[in-house]
Image (cartoon, grey):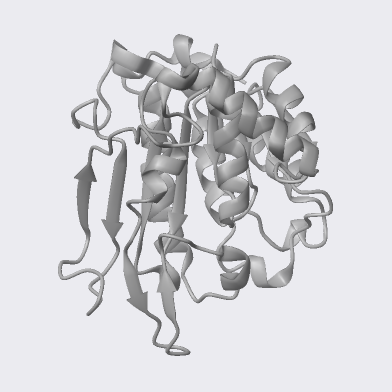
Amino acid sequence: MNTKNYFKRAPSFLHLEALMKKLVATVGGGSGGSRASTELGRLGVSLLIIDRPGECLEEHNLLRHELDYRSLGKPKTAELASHIRNYNPDVQISVADCDVTLEPARFESLILSPRVDLILGCTDNQASHHAINATAVRHNIPVVGAGVYDGGVGGYVYRTRRLEACYACIADHLNLRAETKDNGATIDYSNLDLDGLRSTRALNLDIAQIALIQARMALQVLLGNETNLTGLPPEVNLIIFANRTHPKAFARPLHASFHVIPRNPACLICGNPQAGGIATEADAIFRSINSAA
């Protein structure tokens, strides 16, 4: 690989040398995770791709996934690593099987040895987002997570960092409700159970739109104050994006709203510093999850 030629059209403000020293853990190798991971890997960011054991590419995945028929029936993590290396052969990628909800201790060891600079939350259920959150808060590791609303009408991207609102605080504000046209059921986005929505009809372009915003936010976190890839105030920690209009969700198409969600002092994960501080509370939650597992 001719590195100079490969990065010839990359803007200088990306600080590629700095990015190549970063390590990001992507939790979830589905349609969103595959897209976000690919975008970071192309730029030389080292990756640790984590997915649940036994997750293989199925035919119904192909409509929305970065991978294609050549990977059918094969493990998503290994195939995704190979896919990204087809773009950037020099990128450092490792893969691991881990259910972050059932194996919190293993997840902790994966992201600490070596310690990652950022976690991408790309899973499809709330339990795993909360498990990622508890471990990330406990070890002061930033998270950029994302989710797609039913039918692909839009989605959200959130960021958590030390001493700021954690995912548990932000999830309280994801109260968008929409009525699906397919079955008439009301979806409560403050308590998503995306395991039950895996058959939701959404196009790759719906999911990719959110994944690309997630990748941009991740790059912003990795680069810190070295550059500004979003133009947003640094306090913004939640973006809600409308892919199209929806009578009960979005009046305007292709529109983003930006939010600054404060930390909830009563949050059991990151709040109540008078009762022992962030690390103490996160330790308690982590031990609880670990004991349950």
Along the horizontal axis of the image, is 237 left or right of 74?
left
Q: Tell me, yes or no, if residue 265 can be seen here.
A: yes
Along the horizontal axis of the image, is 49 left or right of 199?
right
Question: Which sits in the foreground, 141 or 270?
Answer: 270
Which quadrant of the view contains residue 226? top left
Q: Tell me, yes or no, if residue 23 can be seen here.
A: no
Q: Is residue 62 above or below residue 35?
A: below
Q: Is residue 172 above or below residue 39?
A: below
Along the horizontal axis of the image, is 253 left or right of 8?
left
Residue 264 locus on image (x, y percent) = 35, 36
Residue 289 locus on image (x, y percent) = 71, 39
Residue 205 locus on image (x, y percent) = 42, 62
Quadrant placement of the C terminus: top right
In the image, what residue occupies the spot 26% across and 69% down? Answer: 244
In the image, what residue occupies the spot 48% across and 32% down? Answer: 143
Which quadrant of the view contains residue 274? top left
Can you name the residue that lies furthest to the left here?
252
In the image, what residue occupies the spot 63% across and 47% down? Answer: 28
Q: Is residue 5 above or below residue 119?
A: above
